[in-house]
Amino acid sequence: MSGLSDRTFRNPLTTVRENPRYHWVGLVIACLLGLVAATAHWLGLVVGGALVGLLAADVKRAVLSGIGFGLLVILVWAGLLTLAGSLGKMMAMAEFSLFPVGIALGLAILGSLVRGVFP
């Protein structure tokens, strides 16, 4: 008997995790989707962290990917504040300006921990 029964099913997520070319393309797509989701709602930070975390090989790399996504969000946010001309005002608020930074990093890391649930 030939056909589909002779082939073993390979999880597409495993292919993306193991092939460097697919992995980088997947990370770019996950980051873009996460940034779009984060502009709509703060839970988009968790979604973006989860998307980049799912592409990681293990939980440690997932957390590092979550940190990277959080830093990307902070850079985009700082760029938007610069374009609006309000980065200086934001930085003048001292401790309050660190609050959004902590939220972006914390929620992205929280989302990336989904990698431990889906091996």
Image (cartoon, rainbow, N blue to C red):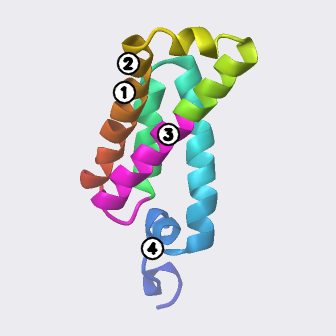
Mark 4 or mark 1, whichever is nearer to me: 1
* Span colored in magenta: 56-73
Give the crowd class for mark 1: few <14, some 14-19, many >=20 residues within 10 Å. few
Query: Marks 1/2: CA distance?
Result: 5 Å
Mark 1 in CB contact with mark 2 (< 8 angstroms): yes
Secondary structure category for the residue under label 3: helix
Q: Is residue 10 above or below residue 91?
A: below
Q: In this view of the protein, which residue sits in the foreground, 34 or 63?
A: 63
Residue carrying label 2 = 99
Q: Earlier in the sequence, mark 2 or mark 3?
A: 3
Amino acid identity at mark 3:
Leu
* Residue 102 x/y as whole percent: 36, 27
Q: Earlier in the sequence, mark 3 or mark 4?
A: 4
Residue ID for mark 4 = 10
**Mark 4–mark 2 contact, CB under 8 Å?**
no
Q: Are marks 2 and 3 in contact (CB under 8 Å)?
A: no
Would you name the residue on which mark 1 appears? 102
Residue 73 seen in render: yes
Per the model, the C-alpha gap separating discs 4 and 1 is: 38 Å
Whichever of callouts 1 and 3 sits on the residue coming sooner in the sequence is 3
Q: In 3D space, how far apart are the residues under numbered discs 4 and 2 (Cα atoms)?
A: 43 Å
- Relative to residue 9, is residue 3 drawn left or right? right
Whole-Å distance between the Cαs marked 1 and 3? 10 Å
**Foreground of the two, 41 or 8:** 41
Which disc number belongs to residue 71?
3
9 or 107: nearer the viewer: 107
Q: Residues within 10 Å of mark 4 (few under 14, many from 20)?
A: few
**Residue type for callout 1:** Gly
Q: Looking at numbered disc 2 in the image, what kind of residue is underneath it?
A: Phe
Q: CA distance from mark 3 to mark 4?
A: 33 Å
Prevalent SS, magenta region = helix
The earlier-in-sequence mark between 4 and 2 is 4
